[in-house]
Amino acid sequence: MNYIFYFLIVISIIYGAINGKLTDVVNSILSGAELSVKVAFSLIGIMAFWLGMMKIAEECGLIEVIAKIINPITKKLFNEIPEESPAIGDIAMNFSANAFGLTNAATPIGLKAMEELQKHNIDKTSASNAMCMLLAMNTAGFQLIPATVLAVLIGVGYKNPSEIIVPTLLVTSIAFISALILAKIFQKLWLPQRANQPNKIDNKRGNDK
Amino acid sequence: MNIINTISLWALPLTLILILTLGIIKKVPIYETFTEGAKDGFKVAVNIIPYLVAIIVGIGMFKASGIIEAIEGNFSGILNHIHVPADVIPIMIVRSLSGSAALGIFSDIANSLGPDDYATKLSAIMVGSSETTFYVLAVYFGAVGISKLRYALLVGLLADFIGIVAAIFVCNWMFL
């Protein structure tokens, strides 16, 4: 992430300068910063609502029931997370909300799942395998009906919108399944996480064998 | 298609009824529990601000520099071979970075070329089948304060790439 952040900003400034767009690049700092706060603040209300609802769902045992139903799948995908963790139920709810295009509900539930996964994380500053898997599920953006795209198409007079639904579903499924498989592969290839140690500067290299 | 639309419409209201009814039956104090859970909403939203600022400002600068147009020019020759119209190239580049930008370009294509054009269909499939990888990573990892992403970004971008390739193939196969 350090290099990406560096690359995005430094390359943009250099290229903007060559391109004669340096003013635009500088102005985009302010508008981007403003937009970030707007995005975050627009999330507060809906986030509070769904976190409240999910708390009730958890207290009355609903999340646990859902978690049990999808257990065969999640056991494979999230093998590091204990079966009785509320994270599993949250992940199932997050996936269903995404599939039905309910982004407003999916994000708060997904974030709650992240908090549950963080409890099982051995290094609180780095992403656990389970988190990477949940992120793979979410960045792939599996959706049954692409509602926004359909609205635009119908707006310009598209006669047969169902024509676009099947190919989109096919593509989104391919991308989604690839994401899960890739996450599983990288889980094995990537350097495993190391537990947080109290004197981590001393131990940083010392544990390598 | 109609069935899925109906499910989409009712999924949310029915979930709410289910949660609240179950809460009452199980004698959970639903109002107190709701407010207890909702308290975290503000905290989570504020927690993600630093991560969002880093990503959204970085990507905003990247877009403003005009570098995307330069990449576009370099790829148009190769992509022409597999029937990717030049109009669609910006969507392929921008899609993982900014959802609103991708949707904006798609609306432009749909409005200027009309609903029956191949470019409209291909860009509709590309936009409809993806999620903004950078934004999702910033929000999800920001909420729990994680800065070392390990392989999460790589997986997200590879899956996006596979999605683009799949979209081109499926569109070639169905609409050419």
Image: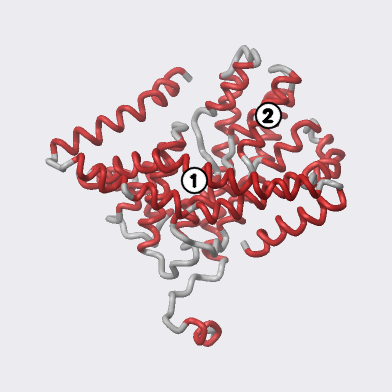
Q: Secondary structure at mark 2?
A: helix
Query: The residue marked by circle 1 belongs to what chain?
Result: A
Q: Residues within 10 Å of mark 2 (few under 14, many from 20)?
A: many
Work out whether A206 lies above or below A181. Answer: below
Q: Secondary structure at mark 1?
A: helix
Q: Which residue is mark 2?
A: B106
Is residue B49 toward the left or the right of residue B77 in the image? Answer: left
Residue at image location 41% in from the left, 51% down from the top: B44
Work out whether B70 lies above or below B142. Answer: above
Is residue A112 toward the left or the right of residue B24 in the image? Answer: right
The C terminus of chain A - image quarter: bottom right
Q: Nearer the viewer, mark 1 or mark 2?
A: 1
Q: Position of residue B122 (x, y in %)?
A: 69, 29
Q: Colour scheme of this structure image?
A: secondary structure
Residue at image location 72% in from the left, 17% down from the top: B114
- Please name the amino acid that badge 1 sits on: Ala
Q: Which residue is mark 1?
A: A40
Work out whether B171 lies above or below B52. Answer: above
